[in-house]
Image (spheres, coloured by chain):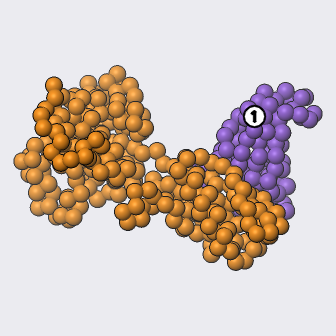
Amino acid sequence: MDPEVIRAIAAAGSDVPMVLVTITRTWGSSPRKAGSQMLVFADGRTMGTIGGGCGEAEVRIRALQALARKQMEVYRLDMTTGTTAEEEGMVCGGVMEILLEPL
Amino acid sequence: MKTYRELMVELARRLDQGLPAAVVIVVAGQGIGQTYVGCKWLFGRDMHGKDPIPLPVLLGSISGEAGVMPDWLVGAATDAANISFILGEVSVRRYESPGGWVDLFADLAVPVPSLLVCGGGHISQPLVAMGAMAGFQVTVIDDRPQFANRERFPTAYRVICQSFGPALAGLPVNSSTYIVVVTRGHRYDEVCLRAVIGSPAAYIGMIGSRRRVAGVLAGLVAEGVAPALVERVHAPIGLDIGAETPGEIAVSILAEIIHVRHRGRGAVMSLKKEGGYGSRGN
């Protein structure tokens, strides 16, 4: 858990739509550990980090989609294969499982 | 039943108080388990009577679309929280049930205990170093620049050079804060005690001879501080291990703090018969 992220949720008004992003587990080398958290707001702003870079950018888009559907999602960010990983040269090369919770 | 936001407000309040918490969420399920994806629980961790190990305490839950949560599921969530608390680990665990399974994600918030040392003298130096080694985030306060500086306390989290009263007023004190009052004079000890006596600190200890300590505490009661609050001050400070040098006294103080923190018995591990220690070693 990230106490700063939790405090930000508690301080925000109940009418502020946002998505709580949490790493639930990782395989191989990943930038941050399970329990790392980030908030994604409806306008795309973020608070906290799950590792930065293009992996986080991908998660941010995914989070906004979850917010539009108002539905929780568990999502695997694969940094080992695929065009994004190769083209962008992601350095970590692991897999992160991420929980997206619209609030 | 609460909303998720209400649960988060409760969680934030606990974090501010320095209390541990765990959030357990059903992140996947199969068969009957699928019904419960999205269910969440907030757990605290408290002592139960004389049980030496703290157990998870349910503070709130969200069942979402599932409606009523069955006992096996609440039991599994409690188990997941307990394992995470014990191992200090964020994890996903699978629990089988008749007709399916659920994956439970247990996330953890464990407060780092903080040690507040009032006074930067000869006992504070080893105490701060040992406190940091024992996993405390240590803050030292002294109003004299030659005593409150980084060179004297390289492992401290924070060194504050300010008068004791205002410095203490500006610091957060919660139930994972341990306070040691070891200033250069009882006038300052009184100032420090007055500032923290009503706080929710887990431990307040003050150095001094029995006579000096009794005088300071009686003074506080005369000022109108509730006797129950004064009684909670550990004074004279430390465990009785015959400590004499600053280093030994620091061990005695830190031993008492760890004893309070983990509810130890404070007895000698190997001492099986009473009076086993007949003579003093060198």
The location of residue A49, given as percent across then percent down, is: 68, 42
Instruction: In the rendered view, tell whether residue B10 sits above or below residue A19.
Output: below
The answer to which quarter of the image holds residue B166 is: top left
Helix, strand or loop at mark 1: loop
Outermost front residue: B273
Q: Residue at x 22, y 31 (%)?
A: B248
Residue situated in front as seen by the camera: B256 or B1 = B256
The location of residue B93, given as percent across then percent down, is: 69, 53
The location of residue A31, given as percent across then percent down, is: 71, 34
Q: Residue at x 68, y 74 (%)?
A: B70
Tell me the shade of chain B: orange
Q: Which residue is mark 1?
A: A28
The location of residue B198, given as percent across then percent down, is: 29, 59
Outermost bottom residue: B68
Quadrant in which the N terminus of chain B is drawn: bottom right
* Amino acid identity at mark 1: Gly
Outermost left residue: B211
Pinpoint the chain carrying mark 1. A
Instruction: In the rendered view, tell whether residue B207 sits above or below residue B196.
Output: above
Query: How packed is label 1: few (under 14 Cα within 10 Å), some, or many (20 or more)?
Result: few
Answer whether residue B34 is visible to the viewer in this image.
no
Left-right relation of A49 to B200: right
The answer to which quarter of the image holds residue B142 is: top left
Identify the chain drawn in purple: A
The answer to which quarter of the image holds residue B48 is: bottom left
Left-right relation of B128 to B72: left
Quadrant in which the C terminus of chain B is drawn: top left
Q: Residue at x 75, y 38 (%)?
A: A27
Instruction: In the rendered view, tell whether residue B163 sits above or below residue B60.
Output: above
Outermost right residue: A83
